[in-house]
Amino acid sequence: MSDESTATPESSKIAIIGVGLIGGSVGLAARRRIDGVGEVAGWDPAPGVLDEALKLGVITRAAQSPEDAAANADLIVLASPVATLAENAERVLAVAGPDAVVTDVGSTKREIVAAVGDPRFIGGHPIAGAETAGVEHAREDLFEDSTWFVTPTPNTTGTGLERLMRFARNLGAQPHAVDAADHDRLLADISHLPHVLANALVTQAAGSINTEDGSIAVVGPSFRDATRVAGANSSIWRDIYLSNHDALVPAIDAVIGRLSEFRDAVKSGDGDEIVRLNEQARADRETLLERDLVGEEVFELRVSVPNQPGVLANITLALGKAGINIVDIALSPAADMRSGSISLWVPGEEAATRTENLISELGFPVARA
Amino acid sequence: MSDESTATPESSKIAIIGVGLIGGSVGLAARRRIDGVGEVAGWDPAPGVLDEALKLGVITRAAQSPEDAAANADLIVLASPVATLAENAERVLAVAGPDAVVTDVGSTKREIVAAVGDPRFIGGHPIAGAETAGVEHAREDLFEDSTWFVTPTPNTTGTGLERLMRFARNLGAQPHAVDAADHDRLLADISHLPHVLANALVTQAAGSINTEDGSIAVVGPSFRDATRVAGANSSIWRDIYLSNHDALVPAIDAVIGRLSEFRDAVKSGDGDEIVRLNEQARADRETLLERDLVGEEVFELRVSVPNQPGVLANITLALGKAGINIVDIALSPAADMRSGSISLWVPGEEAATRTENLISELGFPVARA
């Protein structure tokens, strides 16, 4: 641990590059929810956005450029379109201080993480959004109870990762460390694929509903739900699909395979197979959605670690892969500044035991506090 | 028109065969929303259901059999599983009076309409439901503002159709007359296909999310929405899929074709094609969902018609095909009882003009009231 472990964003300066719904909500939530946040500088190339952001209290200073916003910032959040992230990362890293943390909120992570080698950069992705875009829809509570992925690498410093995860938690989110490639495969299935299917479904229905010179203007609740995200912002989603193409294409192929299997069961009148596939989906949905950790006892585990980059990243990634949620993290450097300890809080006896085992396997001494 | 045109369900007796969520909600809504509804007799084969229905005020009498429930009823609603509808229809029609109307609430219509030739039977399908099944979840407002399809045939009497549509409207729904085959194709796209896609999506995601011995318990809002109906009741949905197989199989094939088209665009990096498909989906969604007729002026049209079966059915089907919503219908028999007039209320100047043209083309004199 090379830095003051309590370097929370108190009295810190934040820069936001791209002040839309997400960037604006980061600014608003940081200003209202984190004590001692000082300047929130924003930059956006679109005319009028910064004036609006100032008026709404989303930022405290309209910057002239990414560099102007980032020069003195402790935490720099890139919230511009996916295709502009690498360039903006380069521009802010060129002027940011040695202890600054730079992160982004892009929907795919491999490309940007591979493109930006600087250890001050840690990829991020809050799973939050709304049907409305633009700074005028920024909300202080946009990240409340949502997952905020962070994608550390072996170069990531423990202090940087701790600051980023704490920042996400202070905005109301649940930070979750995950490898960038695992993130992109996961998002292909839980976010990109639903958009692709919604588009296919809505266009399919439109073809059958439009009859003669009029239409049957009726849709059921399942259709509304299933197509809520159809036709989302074209340029944003074009970039997301393209940047995640090598996870998305196999995911689409796999879904086509599943649909073909079901079609065959219906076509051949195989009621047992239809029931089997449906029961599988029911069990899968319960597994995915009904895992509620709220109310479980939280255990603190203390880990002794050497002071070198990547240690906290390795630990959080291992826990993330094992499905363990980290409720909080604190770093405590030892007096010699060459070693230290990490406190991790995890929910539930079972997860605490698994955490102890996983960290021991990584070679670090660990004990319950 | 062979009957008193104002034969609304006032002081009428209702029978409900199958007292679950839908049947129970029909009973509750009828008793609370329609003045003068007398007995509501219910029959259900599951133990305890009728006691619960009596306790909740959903029915006023627990019948011993479908025949017992139906013998003196003016309106008989079959709300039992799809696979039992034909048998229950036969049983109640064997005892029902000559002016009784028998309808069902099944999710597919060709099979049951083809199986039941009796002119007293008119297929129906309210687009309403909830994630919860069972009479204990019956709600008076379940049909509020939802579409209630009715599927008349050339044998359907005008009075029967008027009574059924008025009943649906009195329960809070918007009745919509449509040909049974058109209904099934439409439902394949707007209801059955969303269920199939939700199942495929949730099983696909479960495969990628479960890693090692744990899981990443995170799903975004688009995933929750897209998979809300995954794993719906297996036996109900097996019957729905099988009974609509010849509309559903081509719909699945068409969606597979659309997904393949999109996959090819992503794989080849064709951003313009991705945008084109996304813009198409956006336009289709707007067409389907954002057609809001509320607040438009409603026009009354009077149609002179001979007193014979199928006339009102033909007119309502023609308007349904043209996408015209009928807000209300009233029948007025002439003194000679051999001809009469139909009053139709439709929303908006444009729809009123189209209605006039369509009815003229059918060969009936029509004028604005």
Image (tube, coloured by chain):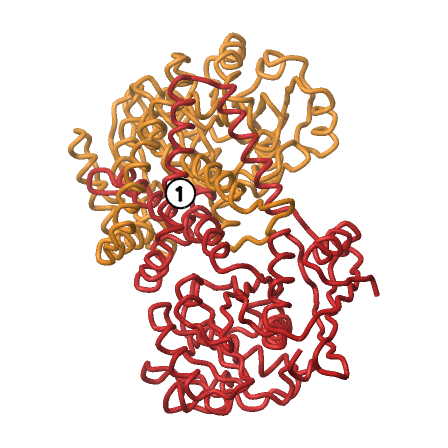
Chain colours: A orange, B red
Residue at 74% x, 83% y is B336
Q: Residue furthest top?
A: A94
- Residue A318 shows in the view: yes
Pinpoint residue A121: horizontal percent, then vertical percent.
43, 18
Residues A49 and B126: in front is: B126
Q: From what the image shows, is residue B52 above or below residue B202? A: below
Q: Which residue is mark 1?
A: B219
Q: Quadrant of the N terminus of chain B?
A: bottom right
Q: Secondary structure at mark 1?
A: loop
Q: Residue furthest right?
A: B369
Pinpoint residue A168: horizontal percent, then vertical percent.
47, 35
Residue A54 quadrant: top right
Q: From what the image shows, is residue B37 above or below residue B161? A: below
Residue at 35% x, 47% y is B249
Residues A277 and A114: in front is: A277
Pointer 1 local density, CA inside 10 Å: few below 14, some 14–19, many at least 20: many
Residues A175 and B114: in front is: B114
